[in-house]
Amino acid sequence: MNTTSLNDWYDSHLYEIQNEIQQFLESLDPTHLELYQTLLNDTWNDLHQTEVIALQSAQFLVNEQVKEDREQHLAFTKQTVNRIGSLMRLFKDIQLNKHLLNEIHITQPIIIVGLPRSGSTTLFNIMCAHSKAHYFTSWQALCPGFSTITEKAQRQFTEYIHNMMKRGCDDFDKIHAINPDANEECVFQYNCYGLYFAHCMALPQYKDVVCNLFSSWNSLMNFEWNVYKLNLLRRPMNNDQFLIIKNATLLCVLKNVLSSCPDIRLVWIHRSPYDIIKSSIPYFKTIKNTFLTKTNQEKISDEWMSHNIAEIENHILKQAINVRNEWVKQNPSRQSQIYDVFFNEIVKDPLSVAESIYHHFNIGVSEIDREIMKRTMANDYQSKIGRMTTNSIPISKEEVNNLYDWYIKQFFPKKF
């Protein structure tokens, strides 16, 4: 499909749900009704100058494929409405604050990456306890914005997402604990933009969308950094602070991330691929149960999901490691911008790991910082209940290790 026909196809589907988008936005924040009424026209040109059309057209294609299944089609359409409505709102927010955003410069951010269920949440919680760390709260990460939404509405939408996930799993808090005022992974904008990381792992309906996880999306980085800056308008960062972020999806677009932020400080978490898949099953089952009807849920076996996760994550990881290796090869001094840490080290002594990372990046840790991090560790909601896993999966450890042999040889030479 050429660009013109793709745009036309996207536009026709967008017009079909424009009233539903309007209703979603008005229910999200009734205090911005006037602004929302012109949102579609206001953001039209900007959206059509990005790769969003290609990404969101894939979502419309997924919706089309389940059109005969009315209940499933309505469920997918609702998610499309929420995502595109949120995307247009964020594009409008960026328009309104363009000059202010240009004045904000994010330097040397610490970004934590690693496959889902690698232990990043526990480490992130402890590192955020540093007195100079600036992070985004759940209500910012799960509902970003500034001029197009109130903090009250952001908090309400965050609670909506939390409740939605709990409908997919009564024990969701045992998988991932969400606290509106605690730190959270900045993944929401990727779903809005069209990179459906979790959906590709858990839902076979997205099999034709998986290739988007391995593609380059140049305009995504402009959007990404502007969303961070919008959050900084609401909760500004002090001059002596550093920004710390975690996001598993960044592995998919690491090449774009590194080119858009040459002074990045990268914390890369590694865990046994087999253990990651075991721990991933409960989480991705929640995604399945949240977004599929009961009839469609029952069609998905643990065997399919285990193999799907193993294959997609292997592809993502291989691409990201190749990007990383090439980036360092081009300039060997960049190796100092990366800190590798292993899951077992985090579980054994997370405080020492956090201190080692800060030491590596020449960030001092005072006694006060150390005490606060200790208290955070002792009261860490995630470490108490957020580590649900499963004891067995229908894919053998040998099969997984063979698939990830290239990775194990580079990062686990003495551990396997």
Image (spheres, helix red, strand yellow):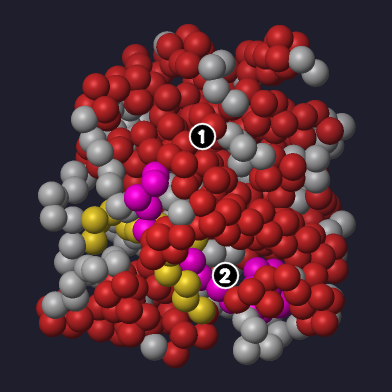
- Of 68 and 3, which appears nearest the observer? 3
Q: Which residue is mark 2?
A: 117
| Amino acid type, callout 2 | Arg
Q: Secondary structure at mark 2?
A: loop
Q: Which mark is residue 220?
A: 1
Tell me which corner region of the image, top left, top right, bottom left or bottom right, holds residue 361: bottom left
Please identify the quadrant where the C terminus is shown: bottom right
**Percent position (x, y) of residue 278?**
69, 76
Would residue 104 be found to the left or right of residue 286 on screen?
A: left
Percent x, y for residue 128? 29, 66
Q: Quadrant of the N terminus?
A: top right
State the residue at coordinates (34%, 46%).
140
Measure how far apart labels 1 and 2 are at the Cα level.
Answer: 24 Å
| Mark 2 surroundings within 10 Å by alpha-carbon count, few (fewer than 14), some (14 through 19), many (20 or more) | many
Task: Provide the residue span drawn in magenta.
Answer: 261-282
Which residue is rendered at x = 41% and y = 29% of the image?
90
Q: Is residue 198 visible?
A: no
Give the image quarter of residue 3: top right
Looking at the image, can residue 295 be seen?
yes
- Check the image and report above or below for 107 versus 66: below
Which structural element holds mark 1?
A: helix
Question: Residue 379 at x, y = what percent?
Answer: 31, 80
